[in-house]
Amino acid sequence: MVPKGKFIAFCGGEGAGKSTQIELLAAHLRRRGRDVLTTREPGGTPEGQQLRRLLLTPDGDGWEPMAETLLMVADRVQHLRRVIAPALEAGTDVLCDRYALSTLSYQGAGKGVAASFIRELHRQACDDFWPDLTIVLDIPPAVGLARSKRRLSKEKSDEDRFERLGLDFHDRVRTAFLDHVRKNPETSFLVDATQDISAIHDAIRGRVDALFEA
Ligand SMILES: Nc1ncnc2c1ncn2[C@@H]1O[C@H](COP(=O)(O)OP(=O)(O)O)[C@@H](O)[C@H]1O
Ligand SMILES: [Mg+2]
């Protein structure tokens, strides 16, 4: 596959503002004349929608961390092969809500599955395909969880399986995101997600515009 579009993933804790910022960035890129696809994990394919239910709602409370990891990767295989890669090949930019870094952070750092195993799984199952840029929205878990819980209750959503985990879990996830950005400055970008929505968008837009000019 020779990608012609850019692949940008958004990661970060619950309630960090990924969905909000993806929509703003998509509108910005479309104004610049780009063709943009917004999508998400888990659940970016019809098969993945079923996995999303099993992974994010109380139906999934019994999964072993290893089983949860394999389901996340199964969702990603479908999504990458059926949706992301064909779009990139066609010249469409793909903005994806969560990708492999979220598996490393949540199932790896958060739940103790070996990072080396998750990386090997990504190599074998997803051809070691990484985004051009991973944007990490950084937020103290207590702040993000409060936002997320408000949104879930407003939308009467039961996709709260990760929100219900403890602050120590969310702290480990956050630390893993921050470590990744420190180690991968070329392909990742850290944004302070406690800022207001338009300040965050401005920061993201600046970095993404630079990506297109590179
Ligand atoms: N910078 C921000 N400041 C305050 N509230 C925000 C901000 N960004 C998003 N929100 C609100 O917080 C909630 C979660 O945002 P959302 O974009 O759904 O986060 P995520 O997709 O990362 O879980 C939404 O109700 C949204 O309107
Ligand atoms: Mg969201």
Image (spheres, helix red, strand yellow):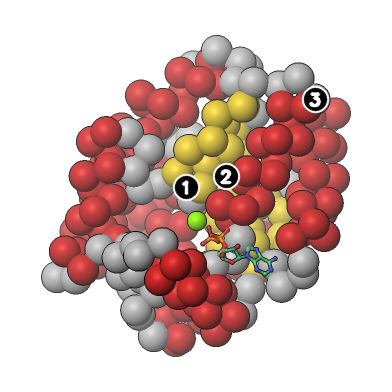
**Mark 1 near ligand 2 (CB under 8 Å)?**
no
The mark found on residue 99 in the picture is 1
Residue 185 visible? The answer is no
How dense is the environment of label 3, judged by Cα within 10 Å: few (below 14), some, or many (20 and up)?
few
Q: 175 or 98, which is in the foreground?
A: 98
How dense is the environment of label 2, judged by Cα within 10 Å: few (below 14), some, or many (20 and up)?
many
* N-terminal label among 2 and 3: 2
Q: Is residue 68 above or below residue 110?
A: above
Q: Quadrant of residue 28?
A: top right
Marks 2, 3: nearer the viewer = 3
- Identified by mark 3, the residue type is Arg
How dense is the environment of label 1, judged by Cα within 10 Å: few (below 14), some, or many (20 and up)?
many
Disc 3 designates what residue? Answer: 32
Q: 34 or 91, which is in the foreground?
A: 34
Q: 15 or 42, which is in the foreground?
A: 15
Q: Are marks 2 and 3 in contact (CB under 8 Å)?
A: no
Position of residue 149 measured from the top left corner of the image (x, y, whole percent)? 45, 74
